[in-house]
Image: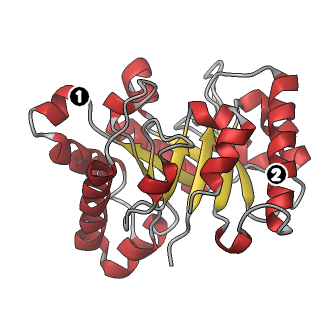
Amino acid sequence: MRKNIVAGNWKMNLNLEEAKSLAGELKAKLDQLKTGLVGDNRSIPEVILFPPYVYVTRILDLFPNYQGLSVGAQNCHHEDHGAFTGEVSAHMIRSVGATHVIIGHSERRSQFGEVDLLLAEKVKQALKHGLTPVFCCGEMLPERENGNHFQVVADQLQKGLFWLDKAQLGRVVVAYEPVWAIGTGVTATPAQAQEMHAYIRQLLSDTYGEAIAQQTSLLYGGSCNAKNAAELFSQPDVDGGLIGGASLKADDFFRIIQSF
C-alpha cells in the first residue's frame, strides 16, 4: 500500500529563527490534529520537511522521535567525500539524522546543469547510505506544447532510476514536476496531473511489475497550494505533493496536509 505524503521544500528561504518558528507552528498544529482537537485525524499523510542544509539538525531537534514526520535535505553530492568545497554528501546528511533527500529537482537540472546520469549517481549514494530519494521528473513548457512531455519524463526515469533493482526502486518516491507550473502560479489541471501520474505508474508496472508500481508514492510538484490540493490529491494516482512556496506558511501547509 503506497503512502500519502506531503513534503515541504523550503528551498533557499528563511533565517534560523523563522525556520524554527515555522516548524514550531506546524508541530503545534500536527499535535492538535493527532489528538483530534482539530480536523479529521483518520487520514494524516506522512509529512517530510526539507529545510536548507544548515537548519536540518535544528529542525530535527524540534521533532524528536515524532511519528509521521521526517526531515530531509534538498540535494546531495554524487561522491562520498573529497575535495568538493561547498558540497554535502549523502553520508553526512544521514549522519545527522535526516532520512530523505530530493534528487533531480527541476531547479537543480535547469540552474545547475544536473543531467540524468549524474542524478543516477546521486540516487546510488542516497540508497547506499539509507536515505529515501525523492526523485523529480518533469517537462518544460515547449516540451509539453510540442507533445513530447511523456517521452521527456520516460527518458528521465529510464536514465535516472530504472537501472535500480526492485528492492532499491521500492525505496524511492517519485515527484512529477511540470516545470512550467513551478513558482509561476500556474498549476496543471487535476486531469493533467492524473494523466502523467498514471503514465508514470504504468512505466513502473511495465518495468518492475504491478506490485512495485502500486507501492510507489507519486507526488505532484507544481504550484500545489491550500486551494487546489484537495482536488489534486483526489486523483487516483496522485499520492500527495512536493510543496514549494505554500510550505513556508504554517496555515497553508497544514491545510494541504488536511486535504486527503
Determine the secondary structure under disc 2: helix
Residue receiving disc 2 = 29
From the viewer's perspective, tell me whether residue 47 is left or right of residue 62: left
Q: Nearer the viewer, mark 1 or mark 2?
A: 2
Residue type at mark 2?
A: Lys
Seen from the viewer's position, the closer of residues 217 and 232 is 232
Instruction: Residue at 31%, 73% (x, y): give it.
Output: 208
Crowding near pointer 1: few (<14 within 10 Å), some, many (20+)? Answer: some
Seen from the viewer's position, the closer of residues 180 and 230 is 230
Badge number at residue 58 = none
Residue type at mark 1?
A: Leu
Q: How far from the left and from the top, in percent, is residue 165?
A: 39, 68
Residue receiving disc 1 = 141
As displayed, is residue 174 above or below residue 111?
A: below
As displayed, is residue 217 above or below residue 83?
A: below
Can residue 72 be seen here?
no
Instruction: Residue at 32%, 51% (x, y): give it.
Output: 193
